[in-house]
Image (tube, grey):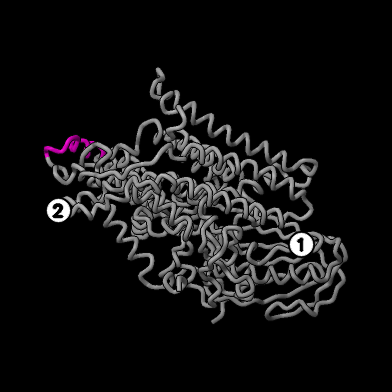
Amino acid sequence: MLTKILKMSGYPGSLQWLSIWVFLPVMGFLLFGPADKDNLANLLIWLVWWPLLCVMFLIAGRIWCGVCPFSKISDSLQRLVGLRLAVPDFLKEQGLWLILIAFLLLSWLEETAGIVDSPRQTAIMLLAILTGAVAFGLFFQGRVWCRYVCPIGGISHVYARASLFKVRPQEAVCADCTTKDCVVPDAGYAGCPMHLSPFAMDSVANCNVCGACLKRCQHGSLRISLEAPSQDLAASSPVVPVVLWLIAFVAGLISLLNGLDSGRLPLENWVESAAYPVAMKTLFIVLALGGSWWLLNALARLAAGRSAAIMSPAAWLAMGARPLVPLLLLSHLGHVGAEFWGDGGLLLAPLAEALQAPGLALPGIWGAPWTGYFNAFCIGLGLILSLAVLGWTAVRAVGLDRPRLVLSFGLFYLLFAGWNLYATWPLGTAEPVAFGAPAVLAQGLGSATTPGAGEGWSILWPFIGINTALLALALIAGRSRPSAGTDTEDFSATKTWNIKDGATVGQAELLDWLVSQTQQARWKVPAAVSLANAGQEVMTFLQRALPPASRVTALAIMRKNKGVLTISHTGRPLTLPDYRGEPNLDTADETAMAGIELRLAAAQIEHLSYHARMSDNKCSFTLRQTL
């Protein structure tokens, strides 16, 4: 059912346009409405959208990124005037560190500058994110901002791993597919906007559930699957170190926020009574985040014990940090959800007052006794899920001290959950709260009597100027940019795979790298698919023919309009006979061959066929056009 919805022609476009039409009036109220926290748009952002975002993470991962109004605006400008430059290597390798910095800065501003209580500062935050999306959309191909820089994308990258519904390929079907339509662009499809290869996707951390690959797949391999969080979180796929930092920092930040809001702890009083409150709160942030990172690393070393030499320290840390994600996500939901249940009546009060129907405000719900335990319920549920994922991780940890692993990291989970349960547990029985209508409805949007309405234009004009300048710069750069036929800029990319003792390099891994280089190398994606198909057949043959101790090396060198894939081996020599037609090496004899070289023709063509001629030392594949 969900797969059919994602394949509908109106998805996600209709939801993106809906989000834009909601965003415009919300931004108007933030800029020109009352400047206090009861601004209706401010309440919608922090009491509705923020908790709803956590719910979306839990259900369908980064689905918000697929319907975000900023991404729609960025995509539209990219299609019209975008330069569509390739993603810089710096962003591919270090982009998540930028996300970590942006996340820390936003968290610090939220706590020290009071963004949540200020509609104007909330507007500045949203306009800054929009400007970033526009800038990266104008100059780069795909959603580079969403994947590599956006702070909301960063938290999505972590939480999406715990989602229940995920886009999954069927490995057997994808292995037999020779066209890879999910990555081949055409007039109506530019490829995955998040720069993923869906056929090789083993994690949903960067998938925004846009449905584009599901619509392109001709074999029904890609579909939405209902899975337990352990499928992604207990996987053995590597995790980059910055993700571990982000997980540890989120744990520290949630613990600090619950401590500051707690009536049981004096932290907030210490901050308010300090001579320098901002410095005091900054100190608390540093201690919370640093302490969380230090404790998680200490317990990782404890879990390793005498087996520390088996894996790298980052691998040990990943085994315990990834299962923590459900606890973090549900604790985050509990924190923002508690604010919703406490102040949500402010959202319905205007309607109840306008219709003179007090019952519409649901006065018995907001602040009711049971709402005080919502946070504790979420923390408890998250603890159960995380311990279950940790147990499943231990089951799959063959050759390690499983009890030691569970006890070490389980201690961190219990400490985190215990602190937050103590901080959020209600002191007494709460009474339901009655709310009046926010002043914005009485005063009117942008009227002369609205306090602080004049600040809106002083905030808006600079962002209009910056985005206009970015648009003009993209137009000028596009006009002065040389055409593809006259572009002589050199390009070269190299990657090596060493295969030994029966290990394999799958076609998916090879093609994933080739596709990522196609734009800068001036390739068409079908050429990369054909080269990967031929290369995989050669490597598969060599691995079957060579003894276990042999090593096969695949060296891919990408240049403008040409790609060379050299496959060599050590061990027993081989000889392959001359032949023509589709490569089929099953019947080849085994004697002496130093290496195999696959070359791609310079012509950019959509349909390719192989012509091969092999000698004792080299096999050259020339890809030619099929008429």
- Residue type beneath disc 1: Ala
Residue furthest left as drawn: 448
User: Would you say residue 462 is visible in this rendering?
Assistant: no
Q: Nearer the viewer, residue 310 or 331?
A: 331
Q: Nearer the viewer, residue 137 or 282?
A: 282
Residue at left offset 70%, top offset 58%: 555
Report the label total. Answer: 2
Q: Nearer the viewer, residue 593 or 283?
A: 283
Residue denoted by label 1: 503
Instruction: Say above or below: 263 vs 23.
Output: above
Indicate which disc, 1 or 2, sits on the residue closer to the N terminus.
Answer: 2
Q: Nearer the viewer, residue 88 or 211?
A: 211
The image quadrant that residue 7 belongs to is bottom left
Q: Which residues are magenta?
A: 448-459
Q: Residues within 10 Å of mark 1 (few under 14, many from 20)?
A: few
Residue 159: % across, % down: 51, 51
Residue denoted by label 2: 356
User: In 3D space, how far apart are the residues under numbered discs 1 and 2 (Cα atoms)?
Assistant: 72 Å
Residue at left offset 54%, top offset 29%: 287
User: Would you say residue 290 is visible in this rendering?
Assistant: yes
Left-right relation of 328 to 15: right
Residue 403: % across, % down: 74, 48
Instruction: Say above or below: 272 vs 28.
Output: above
- Residue type beneath disc 2: Gln
Residue 274: % across, % down: 41, 20
Give the secondary structure at mark 2.
loop
